């Protein structure tokens, strides 16, 4: 029997995690995040599709391809948080709960980072927990999905 599937999605520039402004984002890489998330998801009985792209249309196509297959989403949308109504609409269209994750506390940063097109429809928003935020997102979804 296959395990339920969680999408772990990562937006623009997250491929540079660990090397891009490490004084802000830390030294852990996206590969470190993937290892952490896969281990936590496995403990909780979930499979993971881990994905990163710098191209918004590619992200939308990827999300749409899992409609009816995934049971939840953890997403660090990067800059799309503040710009993409299309991403919001796409996440809503697959009709599963999602958690928005940010490495830093966006509310302590530049004013343009304070607005999110996703937060008001997300199951939870985790900001400022570093790479542990992705794992926390998996925990939130697991709890929600057990109800």
Image: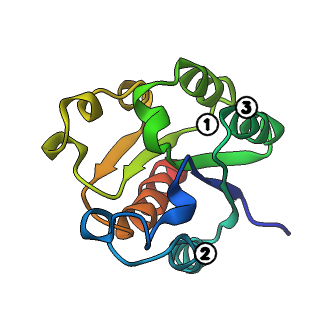
Q: Residues within 10 Å of mark 2 (few under 14, many from 20)?
A: many
User: Could you say which disc has been placed on residue 57 in the image?
Assistant: 3
* Left or right of residue 34, residue 147 in this image: left
What's the residue at 39%, 68% (across, down)?
Answer: 131
**Which residue carries the number 2 mark?**
38
Question: In which image quadrant can residue 43 be found?
Answer: bottom right
- Residue nearest the observer in this picture, 21 or 72: 21
Separation of residues labelled 1 and 3 (CA atoms): 20 Å
Separation of residues labelled 2 and 3 (CA atoms): 25 Å
Please tell me whether mark 1 or mark 3 is closer to you in this view.
3
Question: In which image quadrant can residue 107 be found?
Answer: top left
**Residue 73: horizontal and vertical position, in percent?**
58, 47
User: Could you say which disc has been placed on residue 96 in the image?
Assistant: 1
**Residue 112: horizontal and vertical position, in percent?**
26, 28
Which tag, 1 or 2, sits closer to the chain's start? 2
Please tell me whether mark 1 or mark 2 is closer to you in this view.
2
């Amino acid at each position: 029997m296959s395990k339920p599937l969680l999408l772990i999605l990562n937006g623009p520039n997250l491929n540079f995690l660990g090397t891009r402004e490490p004084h802000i984002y830390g030294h852990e890489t996206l590969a470190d995040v993937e290892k952490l998330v896969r281990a936590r998801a496995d403990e909780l009985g979930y499979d993971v599709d881990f994905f990163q792209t710098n191209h918004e249309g590619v992200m939308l196509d990827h999300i749409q391809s899992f409609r009816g297959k995934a049971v939840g989403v953890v997403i660090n949308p990067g800059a799309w948080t503040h710009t993409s109504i299309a991403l919001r609409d796409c996440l809503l269209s697959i009709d599963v709960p999602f958690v928005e994750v940010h490495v830093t506390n966006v509310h302590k940063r530049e004013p343009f980072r304070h607005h999110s097109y996703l937060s008001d429809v997300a199951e939870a928003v985790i900001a400022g927990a570093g790479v542990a935020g992705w794992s926390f997102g998996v925990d939130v979804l697991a709890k929600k999905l057990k109800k």
